[in-house]
Image: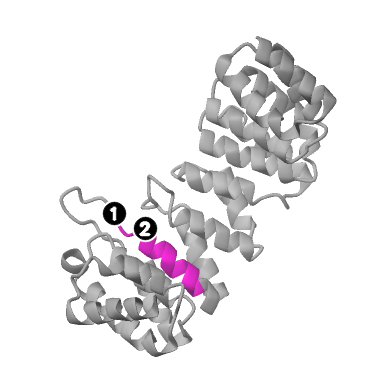
Amino acid sequence: DKERLLRALEILKAEPYASASREALQEFAAEPNEDERTTLTRIYDYYAADPYKRDAGGYVRTALLQALRHLARSDDIPLLERALLAYEFPPPGRVEGTASLRAAALVTLEELDPSLAGYHAARLLADEHNSTMSGEPGVTAVRVLAAQGQTLPLYACVMAPEGVRSEVVGECLRNLTALPRSLLPGLVERYADSQNEIILVGLFDLILGHEAGREQAEFLVSFLRETRLSDAYRYLVTMIVAGRHTHLIPEVLALARRERDRIKAKALREALSLLAGDPEVDEVLAAMEQT
């Protein structure tokens, strides 16, 4: 409740090392209070003044920026830019650890100054210090640029992917559904043989969401016939059926009738069960149960 959230702020002011306050701060983000804005920025500055000792990994500062998101003013832009340029390598591994902090700063900056946020987002797309686990803040940068309709940096990113995290490439691909239709075949060809399932899922989203996606039906069906990438396979058949892509559902039914691979067959049954009640689908499902 509100009283507990305000107590968390009092704990931070009195005892800034209190890590238990992080969770409360995350809840505070959902219930911002204008009266606490100055307190939040002052606490942020305290942690930022000695980050390795006071906030290794930037977790408290990230929670503070999330709490500030709907309270921030133009006066806070310098603070947000400092966060966007924060790169910290705490011991013992000396691995960069503030990706989530930069992502939170970018989201808040976008609400204050979209143009400036767009420049930072473009810089972050191929940042060598994007998280190896999540691709952040590169993934957030893609979403910020896509929301602004700034798709040219996304296209540049997928056409020159060396050093770009697969999560970022996949997110770029799924946000390029407004790509001119003449460019879609080249992009599909570029990634058709990828063995990275994160990238392939982004490519499937692009194809299924693009106005010229029907022209790539042969590629999608061929992938389903030949691939051994079970997660990407399951995702594609589910999206085809759930999205009611009628030009592809007959192909999925044809595959289901002759599929003998246990993992693929399970994925097909789960996907086609979404269409249970259709006589043809029910017939195929019944036959699969008997094999």
The answer to if 107 sits in the magenta stretch is yes
- Residue 141 falls left or right of residue 272: left
Question: What amino acid is at disc 1?
Answer: Glu
Question: What amino acid is at disc 2?
Answer: Ala
Asked if the residue under mark 1 is in contact with the one under mark 2, i.e. CB atoms within 8 Å, the reply is: yes
**What residue is pinned by disc 1?**
96
Task: Name the image quarter holding residue 43.
Answer: bottom left
Q: Which is nearer the eye, 109 or 26?
A: 26
Residue at the spot 62% in from the left edge and 19% down from the top edge = 265
Task: Name the image quarter holding residue 9.
Answer: bottom left
Residue 269 appears in the picture as rendered? yes
Describe the colour scheme in one phrase.
one colour
- Residue 82 falls left or right of residue 249: left
Q: Quadrant of the C terminus?
A: top right
Q: Which is nearer the eye, 160 or 17?
A: 17
* Magenta extent: 96-109
Task: Name the image quarter holding residue 252.
Answer: top right
Q: Secondary structure at mark 2?
A: helix
